[in-house]
Structure formats: C-alpha cells, structure tokens
Image (spheres, rainbow, N blue to C red):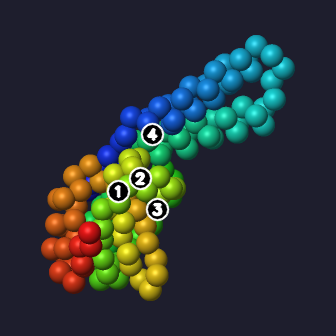
Amino acid sequence: MVFLSKKDIWMGLVIWGAIGSFLWVLYESLFTRINIVSIITMIIIISLLLTIWFNTRYKIEGNQLKISYGVIRKSIALQDIKSIRYTKNPFVAPALSFKRVEINYGKYETIQVSPKEMDKFIIELQDKNPHIQLKD
C-alpha cells in the first residue's frame, strides 16, 4: 500500500520559492555571459527539488517499509520497528509536513515520515507487525 506525504503550505512555499529563484537566475543567465557549470548545477538543483515535492511517499510492501524522498530511498524491515509516535518536529526528515510519525526501529534508529493518511498508515504497520507500540 502506498501513502503519499502530507504537504504543508510552508514547505510548498520554501520548495517552490527556491525553484522559482533558480529558474529566474537560470533565465537571467541566458542573457549574460553563460557559465555552463552554473547552468547545469541549477538544473540539477531544480530537478532534485521537483523530485522531492512529487516523489515523497511511503510504501508498505511485503515485510518492508519503503521510503522515497526525492532520489533518496530507504527500506526498513517491518519486524525491526519497535514503536511509533506522533510528533511535530521541524528538523530534517523525509517528510513535507510538521505533522509526522516518528518510527523507532533497530537498536537506536529513528526516522520521521508524514503520510497524508496517518491513522491508516499506523493501522497498516500494526497489522503487519502487531508488536509495534503506539506511544503518546
């Protein structure tokens, strides 16, 4: 089952503002002295930002939770997940919203995700691994 990321307005403003800025600089560079390295760099950054916006998702497939965040991919074995809890953490994570679910897995590892349908996501995880604790 695939869960798309919840997208906050502030994150949209940041990502689309950065894309707009890079597009403007790219456009302006066409009328000045062309630096091919700068143009390629801007195109790569714009592409990465677009893939983050359109390709952030969480997939529960078989016994794995597969996380896609732009070009970054991560898989977590469902049997390794120990607990999950709701959080509003602004730090870097493969999430496009402040409303997140923190997943504790392995020995001391955590990751935060922001599925649009959080409750359904948690139920699906607990169905696949009934030992997952839901913490407050």
Q: Which mark is residue 95?
A: 2
| Residue bearing mark 1 | 100
Between disc 2 and disc 1, whose residue precedes? 2
Mark with earlier residue (2, 4)? 4
Q: Do the residues bearing badges 3 and 2 touch, measured as CB atoms within 8 Å?
A: no
Which of pointers 3 and 2 lies earlier in the amino acid sequence?
3
Can the viewer see residue 89 in this picture?
yes
Which amino acid type corresponds to the residue marked 1 in the rendered image?
Answer: Arg
Residue labelled with disc 4: 11
Packing grade of label 2 (10 A; few <14, some 14-19, many >=20) is many
The residue to which callout 3 is attached is 73
Secondary structure beneath label 3: strand
Amino acid type at image mark 4? Met
> Which type of secondary structure does the marked residue at label 4 adopt?
helix
Q: Earlier in the sequence, mark 4 or mark 1?
A: 4
Number of other residues with Cα within 10 Å of mark 1, as a class: few under 14, some 14 to 19, many 20 or more = many
Camera-side residue of 83 and 47: 83
* Sooner in the amino-acid sequence: mark 4 or mark 3: 4
Question: Which label was assigned to residue 90?
Answer: none
**Tag 2 secondary structure:** loop
Is 125 placed above or below 95 here? Answer: below
Percent coordinates x, y for residue 112 in the rendering? 40, 62
